[in-house]
Amino acid sequence: MIVRPERAADYAAITAVVDAAFGDLDTSRLVADLRASPGSIADLALVAEDDDGDVVGHVMFTVTSLESGDAILMLSPLAVRPDRQRAGVGTALVGAGLEGARRRSEPLVIVEGDPRYYGRFGFVEASSLGLERPYESIPPHAFQALALRRDHPRGRVTYPPPFDRFY
C-alpha cells in the first residue's frame, strides 16, 4: 500500500470510496467543497493505493479556526473502502497526515469521531485541551483533539462553511 497526496485524476475514485464508506452523497460533496475551500491543503489530502494502484482510502486535513481567529487543523473526513476496512488503511492515512501536520508545525488537530479509534493516535476529548465544540449537538466524547505543540491555542472551534449543512 502507498499513501500519497491526491491528484485530480483520483477525484472519481475518491468519490466512489467516500460514497461507499459513508453511504451518502453529502460526504463526497463535503470532500469536493473542502478541496475547493481556502482551507484546503493539497499535501494533506491523501489517498491510499493498493498494490494494483486502486484508491482504497482517503483522508483530508483542512485549516479551520477558533473564534479568536487562530488557525488549527481539522481531520475530516476519513474514508476507507468497506472491503478494505480493518486492514490498516485508515491507520496509515491518519498517521501520514499527522506526520505532515507535524512537519508543517501545526499546533493542533481536531476530529469528530470514535474515541476508541482516534485515541490510538493520541487524540483526547477536546475540552481537556481547552477547546469548545462548535455545535452543542456534537457529543463531547466525540469531539477530540491532538495537541502537536504545548503552546496550542484554546477557545471555541468554528467549522469551515462546507460543514454548515450538517448542523
Image (tube, grey):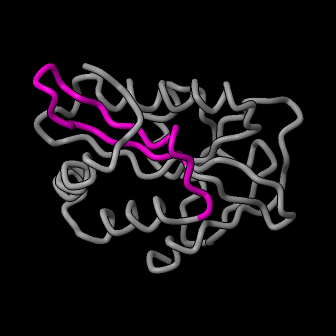
Horizontal and vertical percent for residue 136? 62, 72
Q: Nearer the viewer, residue 21 or 10?
A: 10
The verdict on residue 93 being magenta is: no
Looking at the rendered image, the quarter that the N terminus falls into is top left
Front-most of 115 and 64?
64
* Residue 10 x, y percent position in the rendering: 26, 46
With 156 as the anchor, is 56 left or right in this view? left
- Residue at screen point 48% across, 25% down: 95
- Image location (x, y in percent) of residue 13: 19, 49
Image position, residue 157 (x, y; %): 72, 61
Tell whether 154 sits left or right of 34: right
Q: Residue at x 66, y 36 (%)?
A: 146
Q: Quadrant of residue 148?
A: top right
Task: Count the labels in the image.
Answer: 0
Magenta segment range? 38-61
Q: Residue at x 45, y 43 (%)?
A: 45
Above or below, comparing residue 118 to residue 62 in the picture: above
